[in-house]
Image: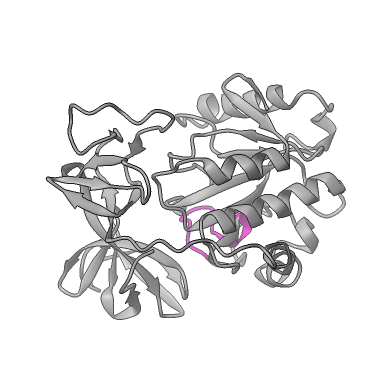
Amino acid sequence: MTTKFGFTKMTIQEFEDWINVIKLARTVLTVQQHHTLIPSYVQFKGTNHFEIQQNMKHHHVNANGWSDIGQHFSTFPDGTILTGRSMEKTPACITGQNSNDICLEHVGNFDLGKDTMTSAHRDTILRMTAKLCSRFKLPVNTHSIVYHHWFNLSDGNRNNGTKNNKSCPGANFFGGNKVAHCETNFLPLISTLLKGQPPQQVTTVQQYAMVTARTLNIRTQPDSAATKVTGREPATLGAVLRVHKEQNGWYKIANSEEHWVMAKHTIPVLRAKVNADKLNARSGPDKTFDKNGLYTKGQELFVGKLENGWYNVGMDNKWVSEEYLNIQSSVS
C-alpha cells in the first residue's frame, strides 16, 4: 500500500485483507455503483492514480461545495483501488439516498461505445463488491447493491431509470444499467464469488442507536476520562451504531472489544423493511402532509420516533406509516 494526498492505494488482495480488520462504527446497508464518466480511460496514464483522485476531490469541494471527495473508494483500469472519503462519513453520491451506504466510483465511461472495461478492472469491481457484501452481511439483491441510474436526479426517489436519471454506472456496465441487467449479469457473478466462503459470524446486538453529535469519540472504557480507542475515527452525525451492552449511560459498540460511546449523544432507532410496493414519505406524521420521499418494497430503513402511527425516518424530515413496515424483531 502507498499513501499520497491523504489517499491510500491498494491492490484488490490488499483491500480484501484490509476490510476484514477495519473497525467501522457506522452500520452499512447498501453498496452504490458509479462510473466517473470524466475522467475516463483516456485520462488514466497508468501511474497517475493519486492525481486523478486529488482532482476529483478538488472538483467535489470547490465546484460542488462538498466537505470532501464524495466517494469512499475509486477503482482504476489497472484494478487498483484508492481510498477517498472516510468510511465513517456518509457519502455524497445519490441525492437523498446516502445514509448507511458505501459509494464506489469506477474510473471510466461505461456507456455504450465508450470505454471497454479491462479484465483487471472487472475483477476488482466484482471482488470488491462481493467482499463488502460479505464483510457487512449484506444480501445479494438490488436493494443492497444499487446503481445510480435507478434514482431520480432531482429528488433521489427510486424510479429504476424511468425519468430524469443519469446513465451511471454506464449503459454498458456489465451488460447494462437497468435493474434486470443487474439481476441477470452482475448479481450472479457476486453470488458465485461468495459461494464456498465461510459464513460470517452473526452477532446479535441489543439495539441500534443513531449519533446526534457532529462527532462522537469512542473510548476504551465507559468513562469520559478513559482514553480514546486508537486506530478508530469518531462516529459521525447520523451514523447508526450497533449496541452490544449498556452501562452507566454508555453504549458498548464492539462485540469483542471495549469500545464505548456516551449514550446521551444518540437516539434509539429501529431497523425496518418496507413491505409495500411503493411507500411514500411525508413531511409530517399524517397522510395530509406533503410527499417528500419514496421507498420501494424490500428497502431497509432506520426509523426513530413513532407518532400517530407514523415513524420518523432517522433524523430526516420524513415520516412513513408503520402499517407498511416490518420492524426487525431481533437485531444482528
- Taking 121 as reference, is 280 left or right? left
Give the vertical position of 9 relative to 194 (above or below). above
Frontmost residue, 44 versus 126: 126
Q: Bounds of the magenta span? A: 148-158
Q: Main secondary structure of the magenta part?
A: loop
**Number of numbered discs visible in the structure rendering:** 0
Residue 94 in sight here: no
Residue drawn at point x = 24 percent, y = 36 percent: 221
State which quadrant residue 175 falls in: bottom right
- Taking 227 as reference, is 34 left or right? right
Residue 2 in sight here: yes
Judge whether residue 74 is colored magenta.
Answer: no
Q: Position of residue 60 (x, y in %)?
A: 55, 31
Quarter containing the N terminus: top right
Q: Position of residue 188 (x, y in %)?
A: 72, 69
Residue drawn at point x = 79 percent, y = 50 percent: 122
- Taking 289 as reference, is 163 left or right? right
Judge whether residue 153 is colored magenta.
Answer: yes
- Residue reaching furthest front? 256
User: In this figure, which colouring scheme has been used for the structure?
Assistant: one colour
State which quadrant residue 230 falls in: top left
Give the vertical position of 321 relative to 63 (above or below). below
Frontmost residue, 189 versus 245: 245
Q: Position of residue 3 (x, y in %)?
A: 63, 22
Q: Position of residue 129 (x, y in %)?
A: 65, 54
Frontmost residue, 203 versus 169: 203
